[in-house]
């Protein structure tokens, strides 16, 4: 409670000066309409992280940067360049990665599996800005947007001009990174290139991480539009250390005695991806037209020893998308514009399972899945007057899936296996959004919104073992949600502030049932997310900028009982219980001080409240993931194109972890994934 009062007080100190003087400032975003647009007159809850914000931040990775924003939390397993990290908006815990949609230049990079986003494939030097859309996005972008949408927008040659840049960075736990790139623009055509290479031993034993990325962004401008192409590749090899076991009743506490050790010294994974995206944009009269075509593929390999019962997996995922859309101005009901579009995605998924790398040519199981999504959406924006804007949109999306599985009893390592019978599935998801914004002469604006969203189960959530331990495809009903949101905001020359309250109800939530044999993922009874988000930025002095935010999130199941089993628990009552891996409270406080014309000092303080562990849906374990506070600082000095920077993260060397899973079989036993203590990074860069 003390932390709540302190965070609200800090927000009040920063927000109070804005009542004295107000002048709205334009800000261009694309996520809210899928076209370049001004955000200040839209009834949306959007935050833009600029390139200068990224440079000033002490964050080492994209998830760390995002976690500095209100209402966004992260779950990190290793603390090694964002490998195995997920981002959670508005309290979805273990299912956060499937309820927050991540876009790269407007295209989804959240895949229909549980592998997660490859955050390290997008180096900071390639990013122009990041747009965060909270509690919205289902109409324009489809499933998996219940928490919101994060759109990472990369640099373009026309924005970068003729330039070149290079940087090196070194730090704790054997980190070494190099980035380089350049941009050329002739006035009508241009090319932007970025490449990076990172190696790190990692805080944990058996956690070496090697990451390589490269991307090219081409633009050709015409009199009334442009043609663009984006090509990218990424490669990662990482060792997987497992968790640290705690069971105090028998004297085991590896979090305290051996936080850097490895429980799985033989486990590892790799990931290689490629992507190509083409966009043609044209203005035909008053109509803006965009036709997009893209293809992306990734190969993932992993080895898990499982205590002498090894499993080696080799999987491929390919997606092709066709996304034409148009923005049509009209005067029906006022000064209006209608965005209409079609999204077509075709996914192909395949995985081979064996007991060793050498035997993958003769796999035990070969699993295949094909998925197609087809959607039509409409979103209309009407200016009812100079100060009032109405937004309304609908989406209809259909999914069809077909899966097959082959089992080879003669394959090395095959033992009591089975093939899932071929199966298919089809479903429809619908979304709508109705929002209103009204702005007073003082610059104070009021926003209200109601809407709905949906999510389809992905391929990893439906391939399960039945009660007889035979493989099968367990198709699930689409998850749906409906919600309401109200906000007040003000933008001034001195900064900005915003306060938001939200409430959403989720039906048929797709969630793991860790207790009931043969169930795997299932559709849960209704759950609810509600909360408050406060944020403010203030240029307190000519050389001192402050920012603060605070969020309170109440995520809980409204009803339901998990049947359980003989080896776990029976009749696990989750009614009224809090969703695991969701902290009630989170706060950030940041400061940026311009020490001199060439030197800047940045500081950031983060507080995250306690949360229940995964598998503790009943909230009965008696042990929670502890709350923690982290303090980071970064010093930047610039001179004639050169920049030297030094950062210390977790300055006070706090021991903490953001993920832990409790045992289904042994009361009081859990595995925690410890994260780095104090870390030091130094970097040198040059830009011309």
Image (tube, rainbow, N blue to C red):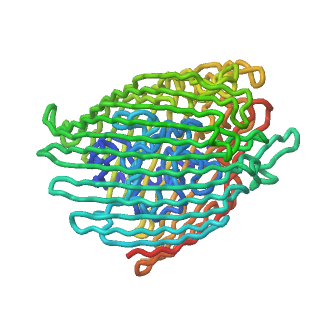
Q: Which of the 4 quarters of the picture holds residue 494?
A: bottom left
Comparing 125 with 6, the one in front is 125
Q: State left or right for residue 170 relative to residue 345.
A: right
Q: State left or right for residue 30 relative to residue 359.
A: left
Q: Which of the 4 quarters of the picture holds residue 173?
A: bottom right
Residue appearing at x 37%, y 30% in the figure: 450
Q: State left or right for residue 343 relative to residue 236.
A: left
**The N terminus, quarter of image:** top right
Residue appearing at x 62%, y 26% in the figure: 419
Q: State left or right for residue 489 relative to residue 667.
A: left
User: Residue 545's spot in the image, x, y percent?
Assistant: 44, 63
Comparing 620 with 200, the one in front is 200
Q: Residue furthest bottom?
A: 640
User: Residue 590's spot in the image, x, y percent?
Assistant: 51, 59
**The C terminus, quarter of image:** bottom left
- In the depicted structure, whether residue 675 falls above or below residue 350: below
- In the depicted structure, whether residue 493 falls above or below residue 94: below
Residue appearing at x 45%, y 78% in the figure: 642
User: Residue 242's spot in the image, x, y percent?
Assistant: 71, 47
Residue appearing at x 55%, y 67% in the figure: 177
């Amino acid at each position: 409670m003390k932390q709540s009062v302190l965070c609200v007080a800090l927000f009040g100190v920063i927000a109070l000066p804005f009542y004295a003087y107000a002048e709205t400032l334009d800000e261009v975003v694309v996520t809210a309409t899928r076209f370049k647009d001004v955000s200040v007159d839209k009834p949306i809850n959007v935050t833009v992280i600029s390139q200068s914000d990224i440079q000033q931040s002490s964050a080492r990775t994209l998830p760390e940067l995002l976690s500095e924003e209100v209402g966004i939390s992260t779950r990190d397993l290793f603390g090694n360049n964002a490998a195995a990290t997920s981002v959670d908006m508005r309290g979805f815990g273990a299912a956060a990665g499937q309820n927050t949609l991540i876009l790269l230049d407007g295209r989804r990079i959240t895949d229909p599996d549980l592998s997660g986003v490859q955050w390290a494939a997008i180096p900071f030097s390639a990013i122009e800005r990041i747009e965060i859309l909270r509690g919205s996005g289902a109409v324009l972008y489809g499933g998996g947007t219940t928490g919101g949408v994060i759109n990472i927008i990369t640099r373009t040659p026309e924005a970068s001009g003729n330039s070149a840049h290079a940087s090196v960075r070194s730090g704790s736990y054997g980190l070494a990174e190099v980035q380089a790139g350049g941009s050329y623009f002739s006035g009508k055509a241009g090319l932007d290139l970025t490449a990076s290479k990172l190696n790190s031993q990692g805080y944990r034993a058996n956690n070496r991480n090697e990451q390589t990325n490269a991307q090219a962004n081409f633009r050709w401008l015409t009199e009334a539009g442009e043609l663009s192409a984006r090509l990218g590749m990424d490669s990662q090899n990482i060792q997987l250390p497992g968790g640290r076991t705690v069971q105090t009743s028998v004297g085991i506490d590896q979090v305290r005695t051996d936080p850097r050790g490895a429980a799985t010294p033989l486990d590892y994974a790799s990931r290689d991806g490629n992507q190509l995206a083409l966009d043609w944009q044209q203005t035909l009269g008053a109509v803006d037209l965009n036709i997009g075509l893209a293809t992306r593929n990734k190969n993932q390999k992993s080895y898990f020893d499982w205590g002498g019962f090894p499993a080696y997996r080799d999987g491929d995922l390919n997606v092709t998308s066709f996304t034409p859309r148009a923005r049509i101005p009209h005067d029906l009901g006022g000064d209006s514009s209608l965005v209409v579009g079609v999204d077509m995605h075709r996914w192909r998924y395949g995985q081979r399972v064996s007991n060793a790398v050498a035997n993958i040519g003769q796999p035990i199981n070969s699993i295949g899945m094909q998925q197609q999504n087809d959607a039509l959406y409409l979103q209309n924006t009407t200016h009812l007057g100079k100060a009032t804007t109405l937004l309304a949109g609908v989406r209809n999306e259909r999914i069809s899936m077909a899966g097959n599985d082959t089992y080879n009893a003669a394959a090395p390592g095959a033992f009591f296996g089975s093939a899932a019978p071929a199966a298919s599935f089809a479903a429809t998801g619908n979304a709508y959004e109705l929002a209103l914004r009204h702005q007073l002469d003082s610059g104070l604006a009021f926003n209200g919104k109601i809407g709905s969203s949906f999510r389809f189960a992905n391929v990893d959530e439906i391939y399960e073992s039945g009660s007889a331990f035979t493989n099968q495809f367990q198709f699930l009903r689409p998850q749906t949600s409906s919600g309401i949101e109200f906000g007040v905001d003000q933008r001034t020359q001195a900064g900005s502030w915003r306060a938001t309250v939200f409430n959403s109800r989720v039906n048929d939530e797709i969630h793991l049932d860790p207790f009931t044999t043969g169930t795997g993922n299932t559709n849960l009874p209704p759950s609810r997310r509600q909360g408050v988000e406060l944020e403010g930025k203030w240029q307190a002095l000519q050389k001192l900028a402050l920012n603060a935010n605070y969020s309170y999130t109440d995520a809980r199941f409204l009803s339901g009982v998990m049947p359980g089993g003989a080896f776990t628990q029976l009749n696990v009552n989750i009614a009224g219980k809090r969703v695991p891996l969701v902290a009630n409270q989170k706060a950030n406080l940041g400061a940026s001080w311009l020490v001199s014309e060439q030197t800047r000092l940045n500081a950031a303080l983060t507080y995250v409240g306690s949360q229940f562990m995964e598998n503790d849906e009943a909230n009965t374990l008696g042990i929670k993931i502890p709350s923690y506070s982290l303090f980071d600082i970064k010093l930047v000095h610039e001179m004639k194109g050169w920049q030297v920077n030094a950062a210390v993260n977790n300055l006070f060397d706090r021991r903490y972890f953001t993920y832990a899973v409790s045992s289904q079989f042994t009361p009081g036993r859990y595995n925690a994934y410890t994260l780095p203590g104090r870390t030091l990074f130094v970097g040198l860069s040059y830009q011309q």
